[in-house]
Amino acid sequence: MKSLFDRLRSRRLASAFVLLATLSVAIVAGSFAAHGVRGQEKQANSSDAAPLKVVSSSVPPNDFVRIARLVGPAVVNINTETLPKDSSVKGRRNPHGHVQQAPQQPDDQDEDQQQQGQGNFQDFFNKFFGGQAPDQEGGNDGQMRESLGSGFIVDSKGYIITNNHVVDGADKIYVKLSTDPNNEDKGRPARVIGVDKATDLAVIKIDTSSPLPTVKLGDSDAAQVGDWVEAIGSPYALSQTVTAGIISAKNRTIDQGAPGQFQHFIQTDAAINPGNSGGPLLNMNGEVIGVNTAIFTQSGGYQGLGFAMPSKTVVEVYNDLISPSHKVVRGSIGITFRQGLSGAVNRVYGFKNGVLVQEVTPGGPAEKAGLKSGDIVTAIDGRSIKDGDDLVNEIASRRPGSTVRLGYLRDGKTADTTVTIGDRDKVFAELNNQ
């Protein structure tokens, strides 16, 4: 007979075996159950799902589509190269910058001081991202610099309008048309025909064996605040980028003082970014009403504040730059005036609108006509003058050798005189030589 101990040990072994067998069966059953669930998930019935199809209906083209198709072929991408400069030669300031507000200039202005102010105007654009890469001037690190910008063809022979700051200081300029192959890295060589730093405009030309597509210049004066506009350009080298917005304001002067005497911009909220410089701002007729020139930003990118030089100014500058002299000729009478007088000061001098003459250039047109320091110019050819900008714009638009009738106040009495307009460059040069 088995002892009590043996019988107990046998029962324990049997119990353990039964327990292990039960657990094994439970595990196997659970695995089959889980597999069954997964199998059911993979084999879900989707026979009631309808396949998707692309709708074949077309959306009628809107004005933006029409304009992009019409003008796009005439908008070009501009690439420039600037070779390393001698480190011993002091270079110009880099034509890029983080956004800062243009500094205020002294109120004293000379309608000839624009010549002196051209450098300051370029500095102003250095503070506005205009589409060039950092250190585009070549710098002193021995590296070649590249920049990108935009432009548009205005003559089928290859004449292109862009910004001066896009090509300024460049040793090589290349232009890519929208029809040029993508594998053509640089594009077609271009040469500068003429530049005008005062308005930051430039005319360049490429050679072509066949007529090129062109744009039409519209009337910027007819544009109104709130009008839809479209911009086309190459922001960040992304050519043929189209953006749209409205005209936010007109006659915007961003840089005060002499450097801003010829800069009265169209402001727009159409997205303009680095590389858009020199591209067209278009009205809904597909006509260029401005050249995208500057942006105001705190990040280096779009913030809804873009500025375009009006087409009226562009046409005048272009026609001068393609002339035999290849330079813009502006009129001058040779005076220094006080800008921005308060109403109290105006009352003391006895006038509401006009320009107080501070100095008269010796031997200049104004002196020859009898104007003196302290005179108040109130009218040109019978039209009232509002302020110094009004006077400068009116005189600068006149051709040297032409005459104007100036109305003025002296000691509270009205008078007038005929002044022969001089060449601004020559008047300024004569002033420097004195």
Image (cartoon, rainbow, N blue to C red):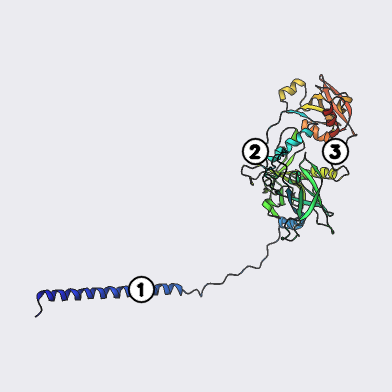
Q: Residue 329 carries which label?
A: 3
Up the image or down, 166 lies above or below 338; here it is below
Helix, strand or loop at label 3? It is: loop
Q: Please state, as top left, top right, bottom left or bottom right, where the N terminus lies in the image.
A: bottom left
Q: Which residue is drawn at 44% across and 72% down?
A: 41
Front in this rendered view, residue 299 or 378: 299
Q: Mark 1: which amino acid?
A: Ser
Q: Which residue is situated farthest in the top direction here?
A: 411
Q: Which residue is situated farthest in the bottom direction here?
A: 1
Q: Earlier in the sequence, mark 2 or mark 1?
A: 1
Q: Residue 100 carries which label?
A: 2
Helix, strand or loop at label 1? It is: helix
Dot 2 crowding, Cα within 10 Å, few <14, some 14–19, many 20+: some
Decide if residue 197 is on the left or right side of residue 417.
left
Decide if residue 296 is on the left or right side of residue 189.
left
Q: Mark 2: which amino acid?
A: Gln
Q: Which residue is drawn at 80% across and 56% down?
A: 213
Whether label 2 touches label 1, CB < 8 Å: no
Decide if residue 307 is on the left or right side of residue 401.
left
Dot 1 crowding, Cα within 10 Å, few <14, some 14–19, many 20+: few
**Where is residue 184 shown, x and y percent of the image?**
73, 59
Query: Disc 1 and disc 3: Cα gap in Å?
Result: 93 Å
Q: Which of marks 1 and 3 is nearer the N terminus?
A: 1
Up the image or down, 261 lies above or below 350; here it is below
Helix, strand or loop at label 2? It is: loop
Dot 3 crowding, Cα within 10 Å, few <14, some 14–19, many 20+: many
User: Mark 1 highlights which residue?
Assistant: 31
Q: Which of marks 2 and 3 is nearer the N terminus?
A: 2
Up the image or down, 68 lies above or below 411; here it is below
Query: Disc 2 and disc 3: Cα gap in Å?
Result: 31 Å
**Where is residue 57 shown, x and y percent of the image?**
66, 66
Q: Mark 3: which amino acid?
A: Val
